[in-house]
Amino acid sequence: MDLTPTPEQKMLRDAAHKYLRAEYTFDARRQLIASETGMSAAHWSRFAEFGWLGLGLPEARGGFGGMPDVVQVAEAMGAALVVEPYLASTVLAGQAIAAAGNPTQCAALLPPLVSGGKIYTLAHTEADAGADLAWVTTTARLEAGHWVLSGRKTGVPAAPWVDAFVVAARTAGAPGQRDGIGLFVVPGGAPGVRVDAYPRYDGARAGELQLDGVAIGGEAALGDPAAGLAALERAVDLATVAACADALGAMTAVLSKTGEYLATRRQFDAPLASFQVLQHRLVDMFAAIEASRSLLLLAALQGDNPVPAERARAVSAAKVAIGERARYVAQQGVQLHGGVGMTEELDIGHYFRRLTLFQHAFGGIDHHLQRFASLRNV
């Protein structure tokens, strides 16, 4: 298996880094997350112009490429600490729609996402579910040709910004059972929809989604309303890969900025970068990043594996390894900066926050270790 990026993927990565370095500076980002909206519509439009919002989605609906292309852009976004909902809309919601929806539904929903005209997100997590995607207590019942949804979703990414939610709801069975779970498209402004928004630890926005007898059309159920779990698992796996790429970009930025800081700070009339013990710590950070890169590319190449267990194994292996290394790199970056590393004015503390949240996103290290072990003989 060739893990080397193609020339086209390298061009995509370089173009993303170039734009974000020039237009998405840390000072501009600080002003953005402090604003009322918390994101930039102008940047979102540019992402659409560049084709980033269609990466990994069906070509027939305006998309192109696969997960190896997605990770190139996601890595650049992690390096720039982008807060716009690329992962939530393009990967989580977009892949869920592409996997579960029928051709008519995909034709109606995906082109506005790719063009940047609509923002979607996936609402699947619940307070008592942990990382168990089958633990769904939100209900959907069919009444007179309409679906009526009731329940609460927690930690919904990009919730304040979206035009529609892709909601995981149970049409049959009990929480924890794999059958009886459907995916439903719920407009953000539908009667009975309430969003309690809040800023996350890393500066992005999320929210709690309350559904109080929300009535939607029968066509709002994506595919089979009792067999949506497989599509949900695939979307979350692919989002985990994109999150790993985002973390890799942040880790690389931490290493670069820490090296620059040690080269400029002086002690005993010599730059800190000249001290051998600190050089060794930088080398260890570099080794952690390069090991993470190989596992990320392997997981990305397994994204379209027709055997779900093989995809899941590769994703869990990447999440465990990159999660552990992300924690190490983030901690080393802050320690080598000293107390200034945790101030609001310096970007290194913001990278630390992003990498800390990443460790727990889509299931923590313990969950993925257990999942990897359970799939060992599959």
Image (tube, rainbow, N blue to C red):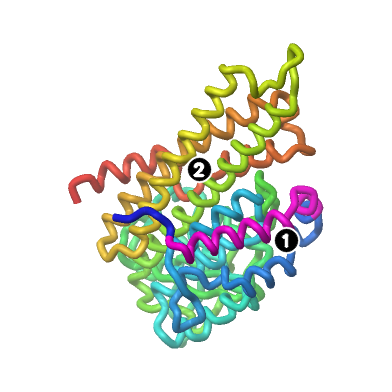
In the rendered image, residue 189 lying in the magenta stretch gets the answer no
Specify the segment rendered in magenta: 6-31
Give residue 39's mark. 1
Vertical relation: 250 (above or below) 55? above
Residue at the disc numbered 2: 360
Disc on the earlier residue, 1 or 2: 1
Q: Is residue 123 left or right of residue 334?
A: left
Q: Main secondary structure of the magenta part?
A: helix
Whether residue 119 appears in this view of the structure is yes
In this view, the residue in front, 16 or 216, is 16
Q: Residue at x 39, y 51 (%)?
A: 132
Vertical relation: 317 (above or below) 277? below
In the rendered image, residue 23 lying in the magenta stretch gets the answer yes
In this view, the residue in front, 172 or 97, is 97
Indicate the position of residue 1 as horizontal and vertical percent values: 29, 55
Q: Is residue 299 left or right of residue 348?
A: left
Q: Amino acid at mark 2?
A: His
